Image (tube, helix red, strand yellow):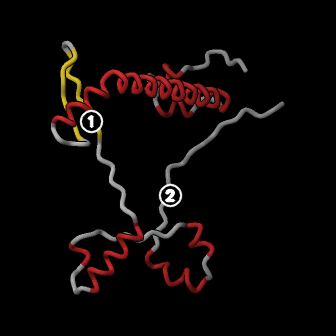
Amino acid sequence: MTIPNRPSLADLARMSLGEIAALSGESLALLQEEADEALRRAKAAKDGLDGALERKYGAIAAELRKREGKDTGTVRFDDGGITVVADLPKKVEWEQDRLAATVLRIRAAGDDPAEYVETAFKVPERKYTAWPANIRTAFEAARTVKPGKPSFVLKPQSP
């Protein structure tokens, strides 16, 4: 599919939203395909660069954290004229069944578990729609539906 004077991704930065929206479906489909491919290439390049940085600086950062007596967090060191800021964020996961049991014990002891933990209730939409009507009705007042971000996939039609 060749479109004369077809704008490129670089052209989009100089175009208004209205100008872009006025493009043909063919042009938009090609731009969408080009953008998806550029995103895949950029992600692969970023992943490769991140891997190289981990290989080059990971052991140094780990040693500095060890010296500071910490498993996670940020350390700084120099590489020539560059300050390297190496962050290893803490990722905490809580076992939900054990948390629930602990909350019950706290409540049974007469304390307020809200002083120690935050409790959130979630209802998967698939389960909600499978419930009998009388159960759904009981929960409706607590349910708000908001639209998500729209998406559009443009695919050339086969001749």
Residue annotated with mark 1: 87
Q: Residue at x 26, y 26 (%)?
A: 60
| Residue at the far top in the pictured view | 80
The percent coordinates of residue 110 (x first, y second) are 22, 86
Q: Residue at the spot x=47%, y=61% of the render?
A: 146
Q: Is residue 94 above or below residue 44?
A: below
Q: Across the whole image, how many numbered discs are drawn on residues?
A: 2
Tell me the number on the disc at residue 147. 2
Q: In the image, is 54 to the left or to the right of 123?
A: left
From the viewer's perspective, tell me whether residue 106 is left or right of residue 49: left
**Crowd band around label 2 with a 10 angstrom C-alpha radius: few (<14), some (14–19), many (20+):** few
Query: Which tag is nearer the camera, tag 1 or tag 2?
Result: 1
Where, by quadrant of the figure, is residue 152 drawn? Answer: top right
Residue 115 in percent (x, y) is at 21, 73
Q: Is residue 132 left or right of residue 158?
A: left
Q: Report the amino acid beneath label 1.
A: Asp
| C-alpha distance separating marks 1 and 2 | 36 Å
User: Camera-side residue: 52 or 68?
Assistant: 68
Q: Nearer the viewer, residue 73 or 131?
A: 73
Q: Is residue 140 left or right of residue 104?
A: right
User: Is the residue 66 above or below the residue 115 in the image?
Assistant: above
Q: Residue at x 35, y 70 (%)?
A: 99
Answer few, some or many: residues within 10 Å of disc 1's Cα (few below 14, many 20 plus, some between 14 and 19). Answer: some
Residue at left offset 48%, top offset 29%: 43
Residue type marked 2: Pro
